Image (cartoon, coloured by chain):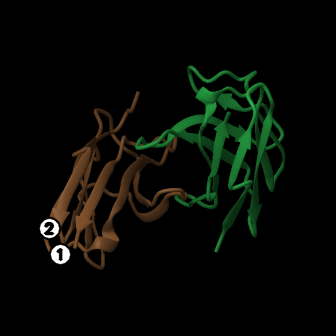
């Protein structure tokens, strides 16, 4: 079946540095990729929707200059957390559309900013 | 702000008990999905419901979609510790999730 490979699975970075998270679609072309953030014991909050070859659509309250999304190819979407701060520590997950009702999620990236 | 309301938020039961969790919205769903998520992992799709009044079964799990397509429920029969997890509903048209129900099944 369709798989989204997400890397890294966890990362620890220093405050002020940037971190890039990659999501690759295997065996399917992800025209659209959803990016979510999940804080402990909470649900998934949609951050942005990225479409291949165009600018991402960000949800209200999500800083587009801080969370840079690039979807340059049909198989790769990246989220870069710029100038990370401890409050950005969270679980980030991507999801690609595989069909009319098909959504495949990555395994998530646990980001810890120290 | 969650556009989908899920209840209860937390549920702790003994093995063998039955339970029902709910997902509600003030607007009509075109279709809705239920997921289960374990800590540190991505959500796993359980079912997609599309038609009002639809009932789908997945082993001990029964999913219902309201006639008006504004609500859905998940019923688990004879819960087992392996059912423990975060149960999430999501609107298909924009893939927004409800707040989730955190289920714990004690042996």
**In the figure, A102 relative to A89: above or below?**
below
What residue appears at the point 55 percent right and 37 percent down from the top-left corner?
A46
Q: Residues within 10 Å of mark 1 (few under 14, many from 20)?
A: some
Residue that carries the numbered disc 2 in the rendered image = B18
Q: In this rendering, would A77 be left or right of B93?
A: right
Q: Nearer the viewer, residue B101 or A110?
A: A110
* Residue most extreme to the right: A72
Secondary-structure class at tag 1: loop
Chain containing the residue with disc 2: B
Q: Pointer 2: residues within 10 angstroms few (<14), some, or many (20+)?
A: some
The residue closer to the viewer here, B80 or A85, is A85
Which residue is found at the position 25% from the left and 74% from the top?
B80
Q: Quadrant of residue B77?
A: bottom left
Number of on-image labels: 2
In percent of width and height, residue A92 lies at: 61, 44
Picture coordinates of residue A35, whole percent (x, y)? 63, 42
User: Badge 1 sits on which subunit?
Assistant: B
The residue lying furthest to the bottom in this view is B59
Is residue B45 or residue A101 the one in the foreground? B45
Secondary element type, mark 2:
loop
Residues at badges 2 and 1 in contact (C-beta under 8 Å)?
yes
Give above or below for B103 relative to A89: below
- Place of residue A94 in the rendered image (x, y in percent of width and height, measured from the top left): 64, 49
Shade of chain B as shown in the rendered figure: brown
Mark drawn on residue B43: none
**Disc 2 to disc 1, how far (Cα)?**
5 Å
Residue B14 placement, left or right of B41: left
Residue B23: x %, y % from top left: 28, 46
Q: Which residue is mark 1?
A: B78
Q: Is residue B80 above or below residue B2?
A: below
């Amino acid at each position: 079946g369709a798989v989204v490979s997400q890397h890294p699975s966890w990362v620890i970075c220093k405050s002020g540095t940037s971190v890039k998270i990659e999501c690759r679609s295997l065996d399917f072309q992800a025209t659209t990729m959803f990016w979510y953030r999940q804080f402990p014991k909470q649900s998934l909050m949609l951050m942005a929707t990225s479409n291949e070859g165009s600018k991402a659509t960000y949800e209200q309250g999500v800083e587009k200059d801080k969370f840079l999304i690039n979807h340059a190819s049909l198989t790769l979407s990246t989220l870069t957390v710029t100038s990370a701060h401890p409050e950005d520590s969270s679980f980030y997950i991507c999801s690609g559309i595989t069909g009319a009702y098909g959504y495949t999620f990555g395994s998530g990236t646990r980001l810890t900013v120290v | 702000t969650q556009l989908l309301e899920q209840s209860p938020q937390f549920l702790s039961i003994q093995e063998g008990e039955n339970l029902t969790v709910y997902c509600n919205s003030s607007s009509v769903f075109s279709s809705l999905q239920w997921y289960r998520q374990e800590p540190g992992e991505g959500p796993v799709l359980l079912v997609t419901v599309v038609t009002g009044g639809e009932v789908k079964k997945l082993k001990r799990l029964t999913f219902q979609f309201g006639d008006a397509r504004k609500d859905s429920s998940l019923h688990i029969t004879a819960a087992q510790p392996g059912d423990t997890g975060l149960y999430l509903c999501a609107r298909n048209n924009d893939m927004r999730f409800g707040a989730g129900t955190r289920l714990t099944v004690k042996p």
